[in-house]
Amino acid sequence: MEKEHKYGFLIDASRCIDCRSCLVACSVENNVPMKNTRIWIKDTGVTGQFPDLQRYSAPYHCMHCIDPSCVSACTVGALQQNKDGIVTYDADRCIGCRYCMYACPFEIPNFQWDQRLALVVKCDLCVNRLEEGGQPACAATCPTQAIQFGSREQMLALAHERIKNEPERFIDHVYGEHENGGTSTFYISPVPFEQLGLPTAEKTESPAHFNRLVTHGTPAVAASVAIGMTGIYLAIQRQGKDNAAALEDHAAAQRHSE
Amino acid sequence: MPNTTISRRDFLKLGGMFSGAAVLGKFIPPEVAQAARQAGYLNAQGDGYVPSMCEMCVWRCGLIAKVKNGRVVKLDGNPQHPHSKGRLCTRGQSGLMNTYDPDRVLTPLIRVGKRGEGLFRKASWDEALDLTASKMQEIKDKYGPEAMIFSSTHNLSQVQFENLLNGFGSPNYGTQRSLCFNAMITAFLLTYGVEEPARIYDNVEFILMVGRNLMEAISTSETAELSQALDRGAKLVYLDPRFTKTAAKASEWIPIRPGTDSAFLLAMIHVIVMNELADCDFVKQYVIGCDGIQDAMRDYTPEWAEGITGVPAATIDRIAREYAAAKHNALAHPGWRTSNFVNSFQTERAIATLNALSGNVFTLGGCLSADVTAEGTGLGAPSQPPYPRISALRLDGVPWKYPLVPLKLGVFQELRDAILTGEPYQAHGWFISRQNPVQSLPDRAKTLEAFSKMDFIVSVDIILNDTAWFSDVVLPEASYLERYDPLLPVGDKVFIRQPVIEPQGEAKSALWIYKQLGERLGLGDYFQYTDEEDYLRQQLTPLGASLEELKAQGYLPMPEKEEEIVFNTASGKIEVYSETLARAGFSPWPTWEEPPQPKPGQFYLLTGKVAQATQFGTQNNQLLHKYSDEPRLWLNADVASSMNLAEGDWLEVTSQVGKVNIRLHATQAIRPDCVYMTPGYGHLSKGLTTAYGVGASDSVLHETYTDPISGSQALTQTFVSVKKAVDAQPVEERKPLYLGE
């Protein structure tokens, strides 16, 4: 799969003030239902014992993986990776099966539990804003620039540069660089990422290719099962017709004999 | 313009371009659409971007509204505006939900049930305005104009509100200021001659903040500048009894005992002056008090302060030396809501003194801009006759009881108390605009009692806030995305708030409402503008600029003002020693005044902002509600467990004046002798279907104490007891009760 992974985020837990401006901006920009969200705050909570306390937080949304598990798990093509590497979601195709939710190691797709015909809700990187030359709503409004947006390459370089320049401020780990086979969202943080509540996705390879064996095999399996079943159905039908004809012949023979 | 949607990028390029295509939009109602298209920012379908100004708090960021099919669909920060710099905070982002709140009041309402019952009938503007004007006139004829109280909170149309009040002839003006920043403003007026000096973070190296929770009480640009300064390695020392989100970003958090900030600051001044660490050249040239300050500060040793504040003397000494070492790149932040204790004025005087000692005046390369701008705004105004002479005393005691409180600040809580005592005379009517005194004044029971003394109460608001709920007439104002307000100069530009959509229902701008009332009260000469646009054009006259140009761009340049170092005090210098204070019988030096303390078993009741609400007016905004924490009572986790209380338990919190039930948040993030409540919850109005039934009201608990110098209400001087509640808070049905037309 040769895609250009054009865009990237750099999220800095040392800058985030948990104001939730990004959360509201996302809800407005994307008209997200009141009971759903495409973006969360992950935080450490207040840690330590009074008065030696700490608290860190960071916004959290779709990582836009290089090899996205959700896309590989989606049997109907509602989740796709576009030419720029953005993982997009098409509600018209979605059947609400929730396979993507099980597949995503970051627990991103958000299900509309309150709806009868429920779909999922997920970040699409504000593609409409990008087309107009803008930035995703979350990054555009962040008052402290805890979310920065640019090219993936730039953001990754910036993440490493900031750690290098301030080794006492950040732990030496760019989250998202290798997690799940690499993503387009990078985190830097003063504390280990599991303390922020980010999933420990240590695998350097996306499980997507395992999924693909199953999900991409599904149509073939489904087709062969369907063909087989159709054959059986037709065979039974034919048998039925033969029997009916035989009975008819038999009845006619009887009438003749009376 | 081409027949396509105008992109954000195009908009930003637009600049002063505007052309005259005049085909009406398909969906957008005609007037705004036509003007907008003429200005060049909406296409033929009525879609595009309109610049205006936020009103979710008083920081007033520039915004760009995205309009589609006649509706606002997104707000972004205007990169050209110095307060937003392209960004909006949580509340700014949610602003369109205030406009589209399903609880909006969209026609005038006249009360038909008992006050507080919520029974209103819809009325026409003519009927509501005629009724209001006749009631106001009746009170004026019977008791004199002073029997009408006018109150309003910080807004751009306030100039015309004041016009109505002054034209009517009442001295009784209630603002929110004494509940907020009287201590800060009075102290800086007396010391520097400016109300609120600007903070400049460009070169700041050391910042001292006394309870200024900038990471939660967000002012978009200043919060950003602080964050960037910290990134650059500036040091932030933050004093607060709570581990706020600002404390989490501070280099050093000092959980000081409430009410003792001034002891900490006086000890810092002691270290600086006794060791001669101040900027001598600056101090000699610009500061009054150079000579006597060592004697005045001699006793305020760090050891003395340790006993009061609980902060080790060595820490105070070190911080004072670090502050002094940063010279004019040190900033002692003046703060904002400084209505904490009756000694908060002294805290602010000490902060002003610390700034004076560092010589950090901006024009000399420092980080505090205390320069007095030239008289006036540089904008024009409609002509009007002089106001009638007022001989009645002000009910709030300014200046006869509070000689140093500026008239425009006032002492709101004292005004409320004068209604109850009837001294020096009885008030009979209350005109309230964009204000919620039922929630904002301390001691809600007292405020409701004051309401019951009124013959007539009228409110101007966009929703049925608690105050409107108890009013006789509610006049529905257009929201900030639906109306014009008077222009606002910021720095070297003048900015506009303009309607980005048509007002919904019957809602009208304050400029229109005040003029209509003025005319009905025979005060038409004070409102010499035909409509909102005419008012703005008259403002623009001295600039020789066109309204169309301003509307298209969102701002226009203003003539530059000369910068010079002038302090608008009696002496023309920074008055660390204040003769004015001495003459009024107060200490001429910043001084220590011991505030009261809670009895054993009681807690200091703290309040303070969260980033998802502004005061008492935004709790019904569904988008903010969506991402807000449930308002709970913070209590130190160790104290909670010693009291056998667990997270989420229902508590009964009691002060001398009231009692509320609220759930517990047990946390390490607060001193063991304090509790904290998020202000602005516990609404009485069932017309607020999102906010009603959520949390509890801090105003129920707050006792009324006033600082005699600044008139500031002492909000943290209320001490409460806490115990497990027997019953949970009852939640009633939420529904406004409108009758037919």
Image (cartoon, rainbow, N blue to C red):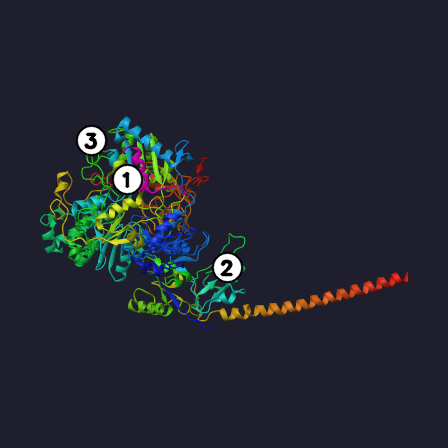
Residue identified by numbered label 2: A91
Looking at the rendered image, the disc whose residue lies closer to the viewer, 3 or 1, is 1
Q: Quadrant of the N terminus of chain B?
A: bottom left
Spot occupied by residue B684 in the image (x, y as percentages of width and height)? 39, 38
* Label 1 Cα crowd, 10 Å radius (few <14 / some 14-19 / many 20+): many
**What SS does tag 3 mark?**
loop
Magenta stretch: includes residue B292? no
Q: Quadrant of the C terminus of chain B?
A: top left
Marks 2 and 3, how far apart at CA: 70 Å
Residue identified by numbered label 1: B161
Of pointers 3 and 1, the one earlier in the residue sequence: 1
Residue B682 found in image quarter: top left
Amino acid under disc 3:
Ser
Marks 2 and 1, how far apart at CA: 50 Å
Spot occupied by residue B172 in the image (x, y as percentages of width and height)? 25, 35
Are dots 2 and 3 on a single chain? no
Q: Which residues are magenta?
A: B505-522
**What SS does tag 2 mark?**
loop
Whether tag 3 and tag 1 are in contact, CB under 8 A, the answer is no
* Label 2 Cα crowd, 10 Å radius (few <14 / some 14-19 / many 20+): some
Amino acid under disc 1:
Phe
Spot occupied by residue B160 in the image (x, y as percentages of width and height)? 27, 41
Residue identified by numbered label 3: B391
Q: Main secondary structure of the magenta part?
A: helix
Q: Nearer the viewer, residue A162 or B341?
A: A162
Would residue B397 be found to the left or right of residue B570 on screen?
Answer: right
The circle on residue B573 is none
